[in-house]
Image: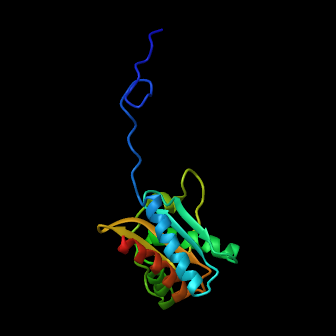
Amino acid sequence: VAPHPIGAQGRPGGPPPTPRPMGIDSATAKTMVAAAEAQAIAQKAQAAIAIVDAVNGDLVAFLRVDGATQVAVVSAEGKARAALLFGVATKVVADSITAGKPVPLLITTPAVACGIWGRMVNVSTNQGGMLIRRDGKIIGAIGVGGGGGGDLDDKVAQAGLNALSAR
C-alpha cells in the first residue's frame, strides 16, 4: 500500500479545506452583547440577548441578565432568527401582523427556515429582533427578550447595534 501524500493542512492528500464562510465574528458579537447588557441594566430589564450569524443562524453570543426567565431566553434567540429569516426587524413583522397587512419577506438563510441538520429552530416575530449589517451586507442578527417587551427590547437591541457602529 502506497502512503498518502500529506496536503498543506496536514490532511492526507488533496488541497486544504475550504474555509467556512464568515458571518459575524465572536469578538464583534461580544462587544455588541456587552453594550446591550449595559442598556438592559440601565433600564432594569431582566433580558436575554442573543446574536446569531447570517451563515446559518447559529448562536454566536448569548447573555442572560440576572433574573431573566426561560421565556426571555427562548424569545431572544427566536427574535434574532426571525429577523434573519424575514430579512427585516421583527418590529416590521409584528406591526404588519397587527395591522393585518402582508408581512414583508426576504428569506436570507433557507437553513434557518427548515432547521439545520434536522433540528428545529425557534422563530419569534415579537419586537426585539434586528439585523446586523457590515458594509451593507447582513452578517447576523440580534434578538432581545424579556427586556420589558416592545420598544424596550428594541432599545436594548439597538444599543448592541450602536456598539457595532462605534467600532
Q: Is residue 85 visible?
A: no
- The structure residue drawn at horizontal position 47% and vertical position 65%, both measured from the top left corner, is 29
Q: Is residue 94 visible?
A: yes
Q: Nearer the viewer, residue 84 or 16?
A: 16
x then y, percent, for residue 13: 40, 24
Is residue 139 shown above or below 102? above
Toward the top, the furthest residue is: 1
- The structure residue drawn at horizontal position 44% and vertical position 71%, both measured from the top left corner, is 86
Q: Is residue 146 left or right of residue 102?
A: right
Q: Which quadrant, please, contains the C terminus? A: bottom left
x then y, percent, for residue 125: 53, 77
x then y, percent, for residue 1: 48, 8
Please name the colour scheme applied to the rendered image: rainbow
Q: Nearer the viewer, residue 154 or 98?
A: 154
Is residue 116 shown above or below 122? above
x then y, percent, for residue 78: 56, 70
- The structure residue drawn at horizontal position 64% and vertical position 80%, both measured from the top left corner, is 46
Q: How many marks?
A: 0
Toward the left, the furthest residue is: 135
Q: Nearer the viewer, residue 34 or 87?
A: 34
Q: Is residue 42 left or right of residue 28?
A: right
- The structure residue drawn at horizontal position 30% and vertical position 69%, both measured from the top left corner, is 136
